[in-house]
């Protein structure tokens, strides 16, 4: 693993061993600490190791002065550094309905008091479906200014409506 590094043959070889151990999962959940004299290439080796592990590998560099600070304890400095390195990736799957609005029918009560009800005809690539609309859904359609010919998405879980644009058909 040279990663653009010149010299330091034994250090590069040791880093290659560490790289293989990381890839095999032998040192999973542990940190790697590089120690040595100033100017010996510790940061360059660490950056090369992080680059060899890939884009998803977090890399946090620390100077000795950060650990031996008068403002915070050594434990707190290391804890903050580790927290910076921890990356949390959240993945969410949602079901959405996407299609062209063919027709919107909203029935308002004659008295003006009561819930609005309506029907939405949505044409997708496979089929044309009529959905019954409740009060909140009608308000959401009005807020988004949805009309016949618009292409919309409806999130099934939340009921959120997003207007994508107009259809040319």
Image (spheres, rainbow, N blue to C red):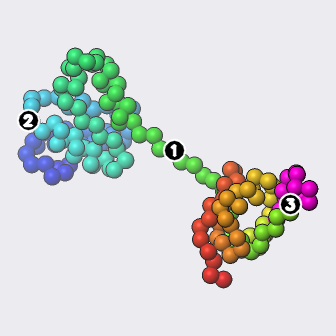
Splitting the image into 4 quarters, where does residue 146 fall? Answer: bottom right
Quadrant (top left/top right/bottom left/bottom right) for the C terminus: bottom right
Residue 67 position (above or below residue 44): above
Earlier in the chain: of badge 1 and badge 3, it is: 1
Give the Cα separation between the discs numbered 2 and 3: 77 Å
Q: Are marks 2 and 1 in contact (CB under 8 Å)?
A: no
Describe the element under mark 3 as helix, strand or loop. loop
**Which residue carries the number 1 mark?**
90
**Which residue carries the number 2 mark?**
39
Splitting the image into 4 quarters, where does residue 162 fall? Answer: bottom right
**Which residue carries the number 3 mark?**
108
- Give the magenta range: 109-119
Seen at 9% across and 29% down, the residue is 37
Q: Is residue 112 magenta?
A: yes
Seen at 18% across and 41% down, the residue is 45
Earlier in the chain: of badge 2 and badge 3, it is: 2
Seen at 24% across and 36% down, the residue is 61
Describe the element under mark 1 as helix, strand or loop. loop
Q: Are marks 1 and 3 in contact (CB under 8 Å)?
A: no
Q: Is residue 15 left or right of residue 163?
A: left
Q: State the residue in front, 14 or 77.
A: 77
Residue 15 position (above or below residue 122): above
User: Crowding near pointer 3: few (<14 within 10 Å), some, many (20+)?
Assistant: few
Q: State the residue in front, 21 or 55.
A: 55
Give the Cα separation between the discs numbered 2 and 1: 39 Å
User: Crowding near pointer 2: few (<14 within 10 Å), some, many (20+)?
Assistant: few
Q: Are marks 2 and 3 in contact (CB under 8 Å)?
A: no
Give the Cα separation between the discs numbered 1 and 3: 42 Å
Q: Find residue 152 and report its horizontal and vertical position in percent.
A: 65, 66
Describe the element under mark 2 as helix, strand or loop. loop
């Amino acid at each position: 693993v040279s990663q653009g590094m010149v010299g330091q043959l034994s250090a590069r070889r040791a880093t290659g061993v560490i790289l293989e151990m990381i890839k095999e999962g032998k040192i999973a959940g542990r940190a790697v600490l590089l120690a040595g004299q100033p100017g010996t290439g510790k940061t360059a080796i660490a950056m090369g190791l992080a680059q060899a592990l890939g884009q998803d590998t977090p890399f946090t560099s620390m100077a000795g002065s950060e650990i031996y600070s008068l403002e915070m304890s050594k434990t707190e400095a290391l804890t903050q550094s580790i927290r910076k390195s921890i990356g949390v990736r959240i993945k969410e799957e949602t079901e959405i309905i996407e299609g062209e609005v063919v027709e919107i029918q909203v029935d308002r009560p004659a008295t003006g008091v009561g819930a609005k009800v309506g029907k939405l005809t949505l044409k997708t690539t496979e089929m044309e479906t009529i959905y019954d609309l409740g009060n909140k859904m009608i308000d959401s359609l009005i807020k988004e200014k949805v009309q016949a010919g618009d292409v919309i998405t409806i999130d099934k879980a939340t009921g959120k409506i997003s207007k994508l644009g107009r259809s040319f058909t």
